[in-house]
Amino acid sequence: MTTSFFDALENRSATDREAELLAALPAQVANAQQNAGAFASVLAGIDPDSVSTRAALAALPVTRKHELLERQKAERAAGGDVFGGFSTLRFGAGMPRVFASPGTIYEPEGTRKDYWRMARAMFAAGFRPGQLIHNCFSYHFVPAGSMMETGAHALGCTVFAGGTGQTEQQVQAMAELAPAGYIGTPSFLKIIIEKAAEMGVALPSLKRALVSGEAFVPSLRDWLAERGVAGYQCYATADLGLIAYETEARQGLVLDEGVIVEIVRPGTGDPVPEGEVGELVVTTLNADYPLIRFGTGDLSAVLPGPCPTGRSNTRIKGWMGRADQTTKIRGMFVHPGQVADIARRFPEVLKARLVVTGEMANDAMTLRVEAAAPAEGLKARIGEAIRDVTKLRGDVEMLSPGSLPNDGVVIQDARSYK
């Protein structure tokens, strides 16, 4: 395995990393309270100096993407801050670009070198200073193209701004400029390689790729490898920048050094035990866009042990689905947070999953509950709690610990839609 690292942060001791991240946390909380109006409200009454442990961080509210969108819309309608009070930047020299994500959610870009922290993932994928990178992420509206370009520049690379579409022209540029590799979605890379074969054009320089934006399934990874391209994936969002990246060990994704990541039970802010699947909640140390406990809505789980490459940060399994499992049952919406609320009422309950069966308009729901040494009458009391919280009747099935799958599913919709 490699002994080459992007910087000294990657192989520092886990103890030093945790201490340094937590030492930076109070200042970021104070910055958010003082300079981002939304967090002045969300974190009202919180003493920033008290937020210096994982437990203190876990006690803060989770801000989810729909809340970011709602605040942005409300502020714009009132003629206020277009970023909904989440950005500490204002239009001008300190904010060279603004981007948009579906919703529409607007994201600022600051002037800091490698603003989105993508250079680390590029280095892990094998890119090195002095190389040309063919960037096929969009430069239109969304930040993906700029995220990758600024990272490549920070790494010391030149970028060809390929963008999306125009497949024959992409092949021509690759053949004539001979880039060291590709950055973009994995599906578009496959299309380019197939088009090159159709055109009878060789692309001998294309040896590596950093892909993101969609699932990078093993079959496509192997398909690329058969054609001489070593593809690696990274996990990033427009709100947070880089969150995690793949290494040549291909054993999960290593967390970026500029974020604090928690995995919580879907619908809550409660951290799950290590190894259990839950929602990724991220706190970024980006002072310009200081998102504190931002719920990504994505499911993942922590992998035990360090990366075989020597990178010492925590590893996650990668994207494992969406955390928002809100389901309509008998005309009522039931949320994962409500299932968690029911479970919290009973100390004996270790884990719960609501299973919805039957046909549409003829729903039945059963709360499957893992419990340690359940007390007499617990099943009946849980049934009452279901009615109290959801306003619906449901059955209760008691299970022994470890019976439910570790997949992050809180509400399983098993109805027939025929």
Image: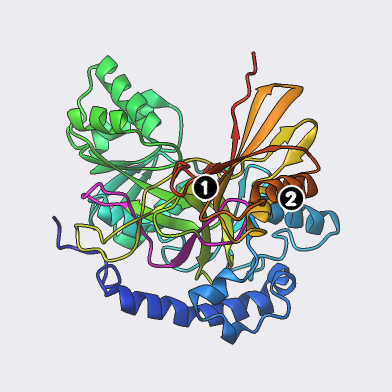
Q: Secondary structure at mark 1?
A: strand
Magenta extent: 246-271
Going by the image, does 222 lie left or right of 391?
left
- Residue 185: which quarter of the image? top left
Q: What is the crowding at mark 1: few (fewer than 14 residues within 10 Å), some, or many (at least 20)?
A: some
Relative image position of residue 272 (x, y in whole percent): 49, 58
Q: Amino acid at mark 1?
A: Asp
Q: Which residue is nearer to you in this view: 235 or 402?
A: 402
Please tell me whether the stretch drawn in magenta is mainly helix, strand or loop: loop
Q: Which residue is mark 1?
A: 298
The numbered dot on residue 385 is 2
Quick one: quadrant of the N terminus? bottom left
Q: Amino acid at mark 2?
A: Ala
Relative image position of residue 184 (x, y in whole percent): 39, 40
Name which residue lies at 46% across and 34% down: 164
The answer to whether 24 is drawn above or below residue 170 in the figure is below
Marks 2/1: CA distance?
28 Å
Q: Which residue in the rendered view is the most extreme toward the front?
A: 376
Q: Which residue is nearer to you in this view: 213 or 198?
A: 213
Quick one: quadrant of the C terminus? top right
Q: Secondary structure at mark 2?
A: helix
Q: Which residue is nearer to you in this view: 159 or 142?
A: 142
